[in-house]
Image: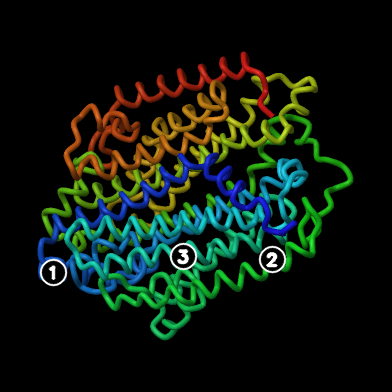
Amino acid sequence: MSTFAGTWPLLRLAWRRDRWVVTASVLALVVTAYSSMVATLDLYPTDAEAAAGAKVMADNPSITALYGPLPSLTAPAVGVLKTIMLGSVFTAFLAFALVRRHTRTEEEEGRFELVAGGVVGRRAPLAAAVLLATATVLATGGFSALSLVATGVDPTGSLALGVVEVVAGLVMVGITAVACQLTTTARGAGGLALTILLLAFVVRAVADTSTDGQDLAYASFLGWAERVSPFGDNRLWLVLPALAALAGLLVVADVLLQRRDLGSGLWAARSGASRASASLGSPLGLAWRLQRGALLGWTIGYAVLGLVVGSIARSVDEIASSPGIEEMFRKMSGGQGSLLEVFFGTEVRFLAVGAAAYGITTALRLRSEESGGRAEVTLATHVGRYRWLSSHVLVAVLGSLWLLVVMGLSAGLSGGAVSDVGVAEVLPAALATAPAVLVCVALTVLLFGTVPRWTAAAWGLLAAFVLIGELGPLVDLPGWAMGLSPFDHLGSLPGGDANPVGLTGLLLVALAAGALGYAGFRRRDLVT
């Protein structure tokens, strides 16, 4: 039997399981690239009008550290500034999630052991996961490029933007494939792969903000993606080192695969303590133990992002010198207050979406605990269903709120040091987004309690909310369509007033969705 036997059936199975998540994720990335370009071209119809605002962004170290340098002082280059780095990071994360899910996660949860009992070769699961992730990356890059061509910009620059996403995604496919052979658990593989992604981002940021270390960017695969420079130098050839890196990493992953046993990794799992701590005697203590590492990482990330947002505040007047940019900021943040307050309102709402993503990720742990059979073991003790469910929901809710506090404090402290808007203004604005975040968590609980196999659809709902928020103000969606997003009912803090009716309504929706989720979980059987 060939070691690749069963690859195509496994690939079809993987696609069938993830087709909606993959489709929604690719669509979100493509729409983000398209909407960013359309909005920029509306603000800067000519390159001459874009040059002044572009120069301010190019000279701001905080913007450069976050998004990278501008490829050129042209309107299309400004239109892809955010997409270059954000598109790279999110495409890389999507590739990571697909490879890990269909390799290490399958082994950890015992499903691959059943599959391996059939006509399935040793290399087939890894090959199927790599093929699915690679096809997804190529689709993301290809459709993003086509979406920009549809706006009328230079086709070569559009293709270069697609290459940016492909470079980051392909390298991450290889990195994740290796990480899944080294570690014993999906969490360990995720920690290793995402740490490398974070280091790549940090190395790239240091290189971009350094006067003497520009070449350091080539030590980071995100630096390779950035150096493609869409609508600038258009270095399409940088896809070649990405392909070489993917091939080399896959060879390493294959060698490691042949040297390990099924279900294990090359690195032995760390032995636990001889006695469990007292906190593990409760479901809440166990849920906290499972999530504390992730929350620490998110906390560090939000503290850094808050500092970056605050430091950008000093250049807001120059960045938004065009009336069109100011109008866009006002549409996306509620529209009241000074330009600086409007800027903070826009960024707070954007980061609130990230806090909602953390809450969804944490709540989704319920599904993985159930499908892996661990919930069944826990519920066989004196622990009741509501108590077990509440332990994970409480960590998701409090963790999300904690991130909002961290973001409000760090952005407020940084902003207060360079402007008149500080913690007293930014922290309440951050906390005002909490009801919208709670709605996202509650919808995840609702899906888990009523239709557990569709729990991952919570990501699709969040993507829809983001698209409504990004595209709605730009294309003048009707009010009822904008109202479908919970982030549209927050008021206009800082600078304006909160929306007490909207916030109360969001809290009621969150409570109702959560209650229905609890009731559904109580009545249904466990799905293992």
Where residue 453 is drawn, which disc sits there?
none
Q: Secondary structure at mark 1?
A: helix
What separation in Å lies between label 1 and label 3 (alpha carbons)? 28 Å
Precedes in sequence: disc 1 or disc 2: 1
Q: List x then y, in percent, for residue 21.
A: 47, 42
Q: Is residue 64 left or right of residue 473?
A: right
Eye-nearest disc, 2 or 3: 2
Which residue lies under the disc numbered 2?
A: 254
Where residue 168 is drawn, which disc sits there?
3
Eye-nearest disc, 1 or 3: 3
Q: Can residue 59 be seen from the camera position used here?
A: no
Q: List x then y, in percent, for residue 280.
A: 77, 36
What separation in Å lies between label 1 and label 2 (alpha carbons)? 49 Å
Q: Residue furthest right?
A: 274
Q: Secondary structure at mark 2?
A: helix
Does residue 43 lie above or below 353 as drawn?
below
Residue at image coords 10%, 66%: 46
- The one of 445 and 395 positioned closer to us in this rendering: 445
Q: In which image quadrant can residue 249 be found?
A: bottom right
Which residue lies under the disc numbered 1?
A: 47
Q: Amino acid at mark 2?
A: Asp
- The one of 329 and 20 positioned closer to us in this rendering: 20
- The one of 398 and 156 positioned closer to us in this rendering: 156
Q: Amino acid at mark 1?
A: Asp
